[in-house]
Image (cartoon, rainbow, N blue to C red):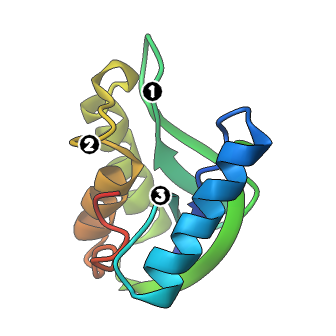
C-alpha cells in the first residue's frame, strides 16, 4: 500500500513569455478564482520519486517519467493526494507496462487523449479517485 499523488503544472512551454504569463493568469482566474479549470499538465506519483505522464512523440510510447514535481517543460503548481493504492510496486510496474503499450505517443490528442486522460486511466487502474473535475479534461 502506498499513497498516490497527483502533480499539477501550468502549461508554460509556448516559447513566449507573454503567452506563458497569460496562461498562468488564466489558470489563477479560472481554477483558483472560480473553480472551473485552466490549462494544465498532470502526472501521477506512486512508489518512489518519479511521476508518470503522457505526451506526444512520433514513435513508441507516449508514457514517460521524470522526477516528481520537476518536469522541465512546465511550471510546477501543486500536488494533491488522490488516495492509497493497495497494489504492490510490482503490480504498479505491470500496470505501467500495459499503459505504455496502450498509449502510443502518436495517439496524443489535445482534446481527447492527453496527459489528464492518461492520469485518469492510471488512477482508475490503481483504484484511487480520478482527477478533480476542474482538471480532468483540460
Horizontal side, residue 134 vs residue 47: left or right: left
Q: Earlier in the sequence, mark 2 or mark 3?
A: 3
Horizontal side, residue 70 vs residue 57: left or right: right
State the image quarter where residue 97 is shown. top left
Give the structural element (helix, strand or loop) at label 2: loop
Give residue 51's position: percent from left, percent from top.
59, 58
At 39% from the left edge and 24% from the top edge, which residue is drawn?
Answer: 105
For this rendering, which residue is in front, 89 or 107?
Answer: 107
Give the structural element (helix, strand or loop) at label 3: loop
Q: Quadrant of the N terminus?
A: bottom left
Whether residue 4 is visible, yes or no, is: no
Identify the disc placed on residue 39.
3
Which mark is nearer the camera, 1 or 3?
Answer: 3
From the image, tell me which residue sits under label 2: 111
- Distance between mark 1 and mark 3 Cα atoms: 17 Å
For this rendering, which residue is in front, 21 or 116?
Answer: 21
At 30% from the left edge and 30% from the top edge, which residue is drawn?
Answer: 101
Q: Quadrant of the C terminus?
A: bottom left
From the image, tell me which residue sits under label 1: 56
Amino acid at each position: 500500500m502506498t499513497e498516490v499523488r497527483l502533480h499539477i503544472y501550468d502549461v508554460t512551454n509556448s516559447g513566449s513569455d507573454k503567452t506563458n504569463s497569460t496562461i498562468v493568469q488564466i489558470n489563477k482566474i479560472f481554477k483558483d478564482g472560480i473553480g472551473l479549470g485552466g490549462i494544465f499538465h498532470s502526472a501521477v506519483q506512486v512508489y518512489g520519486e518519479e511521476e508518470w505522464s503522457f505526451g506526444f512523440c512520433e514513435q513508441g510510447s507516449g508514457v514517460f517519467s521524470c522526477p516528481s514535481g520537476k518536469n522541465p517543460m512546465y511550471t510546477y503548481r501543486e500536488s494533491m493526494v488522490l488516495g492509497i493504492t493497495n497494489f504492490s510496486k510490482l503490480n504498479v510496474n505491470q500496470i505501467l507496462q500495459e499503459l505504455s503499450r496502450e498509449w502510443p505517443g502518436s495517439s496524443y490528442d489535445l482534446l481527447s487523449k492527453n496527459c489528464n486522460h492518461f492520469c485518469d486511466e492510471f488512477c482508475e487502474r490503481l483504484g484511487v479517485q480520478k482527477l478533480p473535475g476542474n482538471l480532468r479534461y483540460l
